């Protein structure tokens, strides 16, 4: 069993009149680049991925895993359980 904490970052993007979100055309909108900082120390940049729950469920189930949402937060965040 794996526990996964993720978020759907759609709230960070503008929406059109039809409520569709405007996202980058060259990548999935949950792909980010992170950099950590502690006091005056900085890490190198590294890739980070936030998957929306629908895409995560599809990818998990199409690869033989079960996907179950255990908890959903107020800002599109969620805790999920993956089982082989």
Image (cartoon, grey):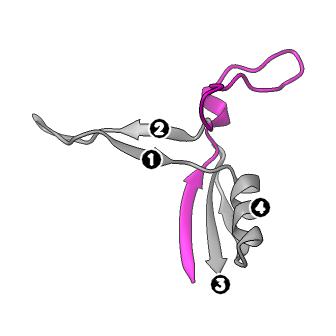
Q: Residues within 10 Å of mark 3 (few under 14, many from 20)?
A: few
Residue 32 has which mark?
2
Residue that extends furthest to the front in the rendered view of this protein: 26
Give how far apart the Cα atoms at labels 2 and 4 are: 21 Å
Q: Earlier in the sequence, mark 1 or mark 3?
A: 1
Contact flag, marks 2 and 1 (Cβ < 8 Å): yes
Magenta residues, start to end: 1-28
Give the SS element for disc 2.
Answer: strand
Residue tagged 1: 48
Give how far apart the Cα atoms at labels 1 and 4 are: 19 Å
Residue that appears at 58% across and 41% down: 30
Q: Residues within 10 Å of mark 4 (few under 14, many from 20)?
A: few
Residue that extends furthest to the top in the rendered view of this protein: 17
Decide if residue 15 is on the left or right side of residue 41.
right
Residue that appears at 12% across and 38% down: 39
Q: Position of residue 8 (x, y in %)?
A: 64, 44
Q: Earlier in the sequence, mark 2 or mark 1?
A: 2
Residue that appears at 20% across and 42% down: 43
The relative height of residue 38 versus residue 20 in the rendered view (above or below) is: below
Residue tagged 4: 58
Give the SS element for disc 4.
Answer: helix
Residue 38 has which mark?
none
Q: Earlier in the sequence, mark 2 or mark 3?
A: 2
Q: Earlier in the sequence, mark 4 or mark 3?
A: 4
Contact flag, marks 1 and 3 (Cβ < 8 Å): no
Give how far apart the Cα atoms at labels 2 and 3 are: 27 Å
């Amino acid at each position: 069993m794996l526990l996964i904490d993720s978020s759907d970052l759609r709230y960070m993007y503008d929406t059109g009149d039809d409520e569709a979100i405007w996202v980058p055309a060259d990548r999935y909108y949950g792909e980010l680049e992170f950099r950590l900082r502690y006091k005056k120390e900085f890490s190198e940049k590294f890739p980070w991925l936030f998957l929306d729950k629908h895409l995560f469920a599809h990818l998990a189930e199409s690869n033989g895993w079960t996907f179950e949402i255990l908890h959903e937060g107020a800002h599109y965040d969620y805790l999920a359980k993956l089982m082989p």
